[in-house]
Image (cartoon, helix red, strand yellow):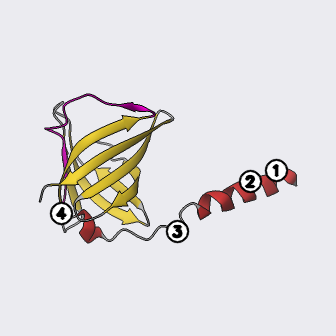
Amino acid sequence: MKPILIVAALYFAFSCLSCGKKAIPDEMLHGTWKVSALVAGKDTSQMDFSGIYFKFNKNNRYFFQSSLNQKEAGRYYTQGYRLLTTDTLKSPEKEKSVMIESIDADSMTYIMNLGGQRQAMYLYKVK
């Protein structure tokens, strides 16, 4: 019985982490966003971010381009403070999720988990 109570308590605690966050309106995402920094753990990446951008369209389609010749394109939607994307260029399609830690008219911060390491991606809006 105790393991069930522990799991229930952990589930409740985790679900309350989002209690103070409001849903992100899709309109706030619309436009082109460039990456300004990437912080993995305590380390800030020194790579050139000038060719890395995301574009979110009004029809819930997105495009991603990196300077390493990586591309993604597909569907996106928001769910509370999460941004979910499905790359339709690859088969099988796979949905990814990042947490939008903050967003305003000209800046946004994603929180991601890559191999168990927390990463923060900082973006600015260009149009």
Quadrant in which residue 107 is drawn: bottom left
Main SS of the magenta segment?
loop
Q: Amino acid at mark 4?
A: Asn
Q: Position of residue 53 (x, y in %)?
A: 18, 46
Read off the residue under disc 3.
Answer: 20
Mark 3 vs mark 4, foreground winner is: 3
Task: First in sequence, mark 3 or 2: give its number.
Answer: 2
Look at the numbered disc 4 and give the secondary structure of its residue.
Answer: loop
Q: Position of residue 105 (x, y in %)?
A: 23, 65
Kindly identify which residue carries mark 4.
57
Alpha-carbon neighbours of circle 1 within 10 Å: few (<14), some, or many (≥20)?
A: few
Q: Position of residue 74 (x, y in %)?
A: 24, 54
Q: Which residue is mark 2?
A: 7
Is the residue under label 4 in contact with that under label 3 (CB below 8 Å)? no
In whole angstroms, how far apart are the C-alphas of marks 1 and 4?
45 Å
Label 2: which secondary element:
helix
Q: Classify the position of the C terminus by image quarter.
A: bottom left
Residue 3's disc number? 1
